[in-house]
Image: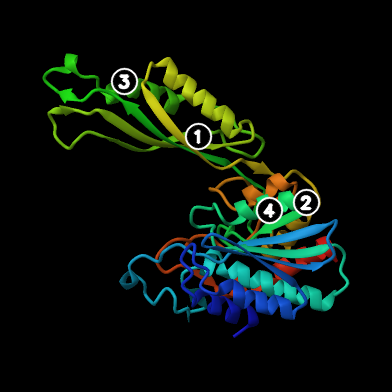
């Protein structure tokens, strides 16, 4: 097996269901230390984080950002092979985390080893940041690490996240930003009663529906550069006792906003609550800010990434801000320009997650080319 395939298989074989790292970072730290990297282990709560650096602090610092945790595999019997026993079949590597994102992490490490071996006195600083809390709550992972970096004045210039970004072939998409994500748990209070005597009750469902309809129908903006328009989606509505003759005493609604740089979370919260108040609701709302949007404008990182991907994909990549969120949302506020480059994402979080071996074996060369363009 190739070096990157061997390492990816070693990682997949460790059942690191979030937030358990299952020894992945210790394995990687040993390899990186042997290559001359300084490794700092940052553990917060049940979460492991690894910060490995080569070169002197100062400009420029290039960070390769990844995660060693994976989502649960689901029923083992639904898989064609054990999700934590990596298997290659017909040129495809199967296993939980193959695409998201142990393949990219393995490629990061192999590329970093090759780069520092060839250029031990390279310009700037090459860093790898790994967490075991990307697929979970994302509280004690890169979010906490970023707080630590901010407190001690770490300078980060460029960040490449190995999230599986490609659509059909490796390198056909370059992610240059992500929308912000803001979630709400809304509770509307009413008065429970018998459906035959509505005058003696107050139905929170009836009261909340006009406000929810207004929020759902609102055109928040027309988009921002390559970002789509901001969207509010109601994801869950619950009320009642289960009986059809009881007016509920409370309604619970979950909704989420995916928003572009026209907005901040604080502004969106104010706008939503103004609608709730205007409809006279007796309510309480708990907000969860998953992360603000980020966007990398034209500059050295975006230019280098575009040129490298075009060489590997055979055509200029699509440049996108779509998709959900990634840990880059915590690195961007530190002042770093961020892009996401990784394998094809068609199977992530699914049964029989996989990555083409040819793509996996090309990834270290892709990352190495990008590192060399920026730090060579």
Q: Quadrant of the N terminus?
A: bottom right
Lower sequence index among marks 4 and 2:
4
- Residue labelled with disc 1: 231
Residue shown at 71%/53% (left/top)? 149
Q: CA distance from mark 2 to mark 1?
A: 35 Å
Number of other residues with Cα within 10 Å of mark 2, as a class: few under 14, some 14 to 19, many 20 or more? few
Q: CA distance from mark 2 to mark 3?
A: 50 Å
Give SS at disc 1.
strand
Q: CA distance from mark 3 to mark 1?
A: 23 Å
- Residue labelled with disc 2: 153
Lower sequence index among marks 3 and 1:
3
Query: Does residue 14 show up?
Result: yes
- Residue 8 drawn above or below residue 40: below
Q: Is residue 133 left or right of residue 3?
A: left
- Residue 360 drawn above or below residue 325: below
Q: CA distance from mark 3 to mark 4?
A: 45 Å
Rendering coords of residue 167 (x, y %): 56, 57
Lower sequence index among marks 2 and 3:
2
Rendering coords of residue 141 (x, y %): 58, 57
Give SS at disc 4.
helix
- Residue labelled with disc 3: 207
- Residue labelled with disc 4: 148
- Residue 64 drawn above or below residue 235: below
Rendering coords of residue 91 (x, y %): 52, 78
Lower sequence index among marks 2 and 1:
2
């Amino acid at each position: 097996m190739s070096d990157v395939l061997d390492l990816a298989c070693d990682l997949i074989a460790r059942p690191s269901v979030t937030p358990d790292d299952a020894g992945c970072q210790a394995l990687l730290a040993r390899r990186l230390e042997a290559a001359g990297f300084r490794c700092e282990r940052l553990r917060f709560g049940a979460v492991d984080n690894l910060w490995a650096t080569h070169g002197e602090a100062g400009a420029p610092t290039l960070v390769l950002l990844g995660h060693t945790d994976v989502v649960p595999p689901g029923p083992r019997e639904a898989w064609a092979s054990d999700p934590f026993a990596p298997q290659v079949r017909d040129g495809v590597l199967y296993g939980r985390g193959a695409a998201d994102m142990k393949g990219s992490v393995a490629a990061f490490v192999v590329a970093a080893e090759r780069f520092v071996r060839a250029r031990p006195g390279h310009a700037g600083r090459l860093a790898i940041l790994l967490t075991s809390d990307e697929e979970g709550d994302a509280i004690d992972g890169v979010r906490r690490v970023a707080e630590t970096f901010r407190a001690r004045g770490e300078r980060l210039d460029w960040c490449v996240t190995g999230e599986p970004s490609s659509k059909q072939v490796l390198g056909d998409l370059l992610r240059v930003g992500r929308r912000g994500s803001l979630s709400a748990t809304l509770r509307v209070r009413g008065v429970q009663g018998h459906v035959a005597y509505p005058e003696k009750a107050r139905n929170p469902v009836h009261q909340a529906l006009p406000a929810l309809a207004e929020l759902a129908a609102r055109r928040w903006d027309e988009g921002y550069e390559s970002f789509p328009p901001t969207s509010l989606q109601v994801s869950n509505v619950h009320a009642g006792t289960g009986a059809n003759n009881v007016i509920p005493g409370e309604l619970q609604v979950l909704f989420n906003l995916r928003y572009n740089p026209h907005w901040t979370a604080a502004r969106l919260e104010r706008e939503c609550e103004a609608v709730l108040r205007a409809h006279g609701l007796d309510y309480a709302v708990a907000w969860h800010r998953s992360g603000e949007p980020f966007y990398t404008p034209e500059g050295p990182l975006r230019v280098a990434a575009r040129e490298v991907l075009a060489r590997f994909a055979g055509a200029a990549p699509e440049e996108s801000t779509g998709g959900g969120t990634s840990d880059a949302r915590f690195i961007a506020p530190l002042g770093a320009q961020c892009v996401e480059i990784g394998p094809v994402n068609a199977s992530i979080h699914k049964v029989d997650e996989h990555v083409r071996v040819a793509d996996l074996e090309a990834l270290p060369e892709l990352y190495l080319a990008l590192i060399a363009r920026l730090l060579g």
